[in-house]
Image (cartoon, rainbow, N blue to C red):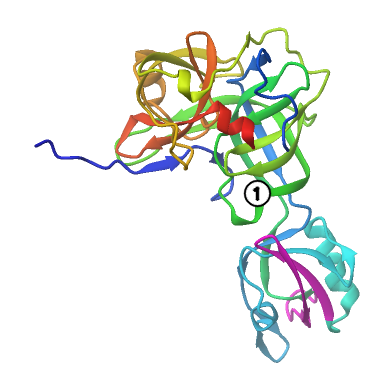
Amino acid sequence: MRKRIFFPAVLLLAACFMFGGTTTQVGAEGCEYYLGGMPAGFTLSEGGAEIIGLNEVAGEDGLYSPAEKAGIKAGDCIVAVDDIAVKSIADLNAAMERSCGKKIKLTIKRGGETAEVEITPVKDAKTGKFKIGVLIRDTLTGIGTVTYINKETLRFGALGHAVATDNLSDLGIADSKVYLCSIVGVNKGVRGKAGELRGLFMNDKPIAKAEKVCASGLYGTFNKDYDFSHLKILESAPISEAKIGKACIYSTVDGICPQEYQISIVKVDANQKDNKNFVVKITDERLIDETGGIVQGMSGSPIVQNGKLIGAITHVFLNDPTRGYGIGIEKMFEN
């Protein structure tokens, strides 16, 4: 009897922190898509100050933990102070100074629900600033791959899996943008350790607006002035048409231009619930030489078989970087 070996898998969003709306007409019969494969830099914000940790404030007469005392937790997002919207770290700092150490009301989002808590900021003995004892960030930045762009609506899908943060899962996002990105280096994947693409945002002008993240990826709308002339156009196919055997992916591991790489689909499972409808193996020696196989940052790389878009890369097997999972494109369309 052959022994069955389990290979753990990891998500493929390359993140700068350690850290893809409902699409109209997407998936309709005869609908055409610009094929992705290009790298993109994402700056995602839920429109508030996300708490990533708690700490103590050194007041004039001792140490205080206002946030912990108020029941605030890592993962909470502060969206308002005394009913005044907070959209950034600067907004929160300004609200702390306005408090002058008096009790204030925070509006917190946690797990899709909103609550209000009262808290009293403490004056830091060293800086003189009022603090509540939290570590915060207002944006999440990372690199991933665009999967498709609807030719008619310019709606796009990317990543193929959830962004790795509880706060931005299945929620609308505010003031979040997509930028052209150039891949400038690769940390090769090896057995037991996932590799990673290293990229730089090309400029400060966004190429698209991100509007929603959920379990199957990141979605939004490309700008009309983006140059689509160099992109392939093709139709999609459901998981039911996918076959075990030869296919290809489009991905970018150097610069900004996607390249075609050969893969083999070794398993198809339309009923899999966790964005793992395909098991794929990289067979293209060029890609294996450059990256070791599948690496972080390649999530969203479109899978094409028989000239049709059928899915996107989502995970790499940690113990075998030449193998990984893919999501069926129809599941990305559904969300």
Q: Can residue 268 be seen in this view?
A: yes
Q: Quadrant of the C terminus?
A: top right
In the rendering, at what x and y percent does residue 7 appear?
Answer: 30, 41
Q: Which amino acid does label 1 sit on?
A: Asp
Q: Nearer the viewer, residue 186 or 10?
A: 10
- The residue sitting at 54% across, 38% down in the picture is 14
Q: Which of 295 and 31 is in front in this view?
A: 31
Vertical position of residue 100 compared to residue 217: above or below: below
Q: Is mark 1 on a helix, strand or loop?
A: loop
Q: Mark 1 points at which residue?
A: 170
State which region is magenta.
104-129
For the stretch drawn in magenta, the main secondary structure is strand
Q: Is residue 239 a member of the stretch shown in magenta?
A: no
Q: How many labels does the image show?
A: 1
In the rendering, at what x and y percent does residue 33 appear?
Answer: 66, 16
Crowd tier of the residue under label 1, counting other residues whose Cα lies within 10 Å: few below 14, some 14–19, many 20 or above: some
Left or right, residue 44 beside residue 295: right
Vertical position of residue 211 compared to residue 252: above or below: below
Quadrant of the rendered image containing residue 283:
top left
In the rendering, at what x and y percent does residue 253 appear?
Answer: 51, 22
Left or right, residue 327 beside residue 53: left
Q: Is residue 20 visible?
A: no
Quadrant of the rendered image containing residue 1:
top left
In the rendering, at what x and y percent does residue 130 appear?
Answer: 79, 76
Q: Which of 82 and 29 is in front in this view?
A: 29
Q: Nearer the viewer, residue 203 or 247?
A: 247
